[in-house]
Image: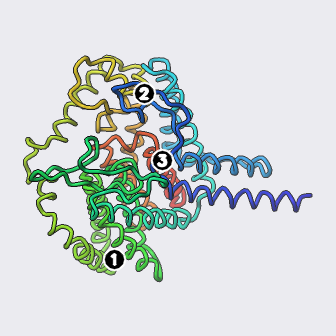
Amino acid sequence: MLLSQNKTTHVFDISAKIFFALTIIFISFRWRVDIWLRPMPPVYSDYTNFQLFLSDITLIYLLTFWLACLILNPKKIKAGNPLIWIGLIGLTISGVISVFGSVDSILSQYHVIRFILLLLLYLYIVNEVQSPVWVIVPIALQIIIQAPVAIRQSLAQSSLGLQTFGEILLDPQILGTSIIPIDGIRFLRAYGLSDHPNILGGSIAFSLIILFAVVLYGKNRQPLFASILFLISFPALIMTFSRSAWLGLMVSISFMVSVEAFARRWESIQRIIILSLLSLIVIMPFSLENISVFQKRINAGNLAQDEPMKERGFLLQAGNTLFIEHPLLGIGLSATPFAFERRFEEFPLSYQPPHYVPLLVPLETGVLGGIFYLILFFMPFIYFAIKRKEIINNPYVMGASALLVTISVISLFDYYTWYVTGRMWHWLAWGLFSVAIEREQ
């Protein structure tokens, strides 16, 4: 009887790990099931519908198998780093409180459930994911799937007929498709199998920083394999034309390179130089052929003529107005687009959240939620300042810190990391960082 129970527990444990890997693989995928359609035009339906993404389904299976393991073989559950745990508990409680002031109470309740699932995901990572292999391999598989699709879309300037797998029907001439207008041409940005180029760009940037950590700290042939995957997926990141993703990756890589130079690890610096040169060579043909598109995207330094930046400035002002009016409870988890529609009679843009998560969090969850988020936001920077000498020699902490830095930078320019599946990257990173610093101690 005991032997049979142990065998069953082992099967459940392996199943949970497999679904954990699948959750990471599918984290950027658009494929989903609409479980409740709630059309509220002119608000975009994805903001109001109840949806289960592929990564949500795998997450539910993961937690189900893990719970079964705990029932069959009870053990003490660790909360990980106290400050991270307090921050995540605080965010969850703030989300619950926001329901009472929400402009769309039922929607906020739905997202509270999602927050609870993410909190359980964090606990699973802290208690069960002790080997980086269970993160690195799924991230590599995600890139192997997404990058070729994105590259082919950009080169073909159309979708590839993969709608069965969640690909959006892409036509640069259709309004609403993310494009870059240049000389009368509507240049299509790469979507991959995600919902938006910025979402794909963010996911690739997060994946690339993990691969870059393997290039720096891996053993034997690991740096070689990671470099190959980096070179395969780097063009896909470029083709999303996601400036926040570009910046996030650049800042994090600069951080890691600076640490390696400070520690005088010249072998790692040599790897970085070779990888950098090869990356430039790989993207050179596409860059030269589309130089005018790049110039348009980076504005040649002229932000005053950048329409997306002006739109984001307007959204920030609208968000500030709502926050001032609802500072205590917030306007409710994920209810910002609907709140904008109710509050402003004239809104020159499509209803969407501000592209600045440090404002979006307190806007939706009140001041208390904003405080807990800022604790989590600044923690890796403070931890590095306090324990710099220990961290620079710990590859696990360096990799997890770089991932959080990338997410933090993107969060300053896009709301993706606070909405729906993008949150998984945030909670995954906090879990990995907690595991890394607990191991370091």
Q: Earlier in the sequence, mark 3 or mark 1?
A: 1
Amino acid residing under circle 1: Ser
The numbered dot on residue 365 is: 2
Q: Are marks 3 and 2 in contact (CB under 8 Å)?
A: no
Q: Cα distance, mark 3 to mark 2?
A: 18 Å
- The residue labelled by disc 3 is 424
Q: Are marks 1 and 2 in contact (CB under 8 Å)?
A: no
Q: Is residue 46 above or below residue 294?
A: above
Amino acid residing under circle 2: Thr
Q: Residue at (22%, 20%) from the top-left corner?
A: 346
User: Viewer-proximal residue, 258 or 286?
Assistant: 286
Q: Cα distance, mark 3 to mark 1?
A: 30 Å
Residue 138 position, x and y percent, is: 51, 63
Is 439 situated left or right of 328 in this image? Answer: right
Q: Cα distance, mark 1 to mark 2?
A: 43 Å
Is 348 situated left or right of 64 in this image? Answer: left
Question: In front: mark 3 or mark 1?
Answer: 3
Amino acid residing under circle 3: Met
Q: Residue at (37%, 38%) from the top-left corner?
A: 374
Q: Earlier in the sequence, mark 3 or mark 2?
A: 2
Q: Is residue 402 visible?
A: no
Q: Is residue 313 above or below residue 178?
A: above
Q: Earlier in the sequence, mark 1 or mark 2?
A: 1
The numbered dot on residue 81 is: none
Instruction: Tell me the element at label 2.
Output: helix
User: Viewer-proximal residue, 58 or 137?
Assistant: 58
- The residue labelled by disc 1 is 268
Residue 384 position, x and y percent, is: 37, 55
Instruction: Tell me the element at label 1.
Output: helix
The residue furthest right is: 1
Instruction: Tell me the element at label 3.
Output: helix
The residue furthest bottom is: 220
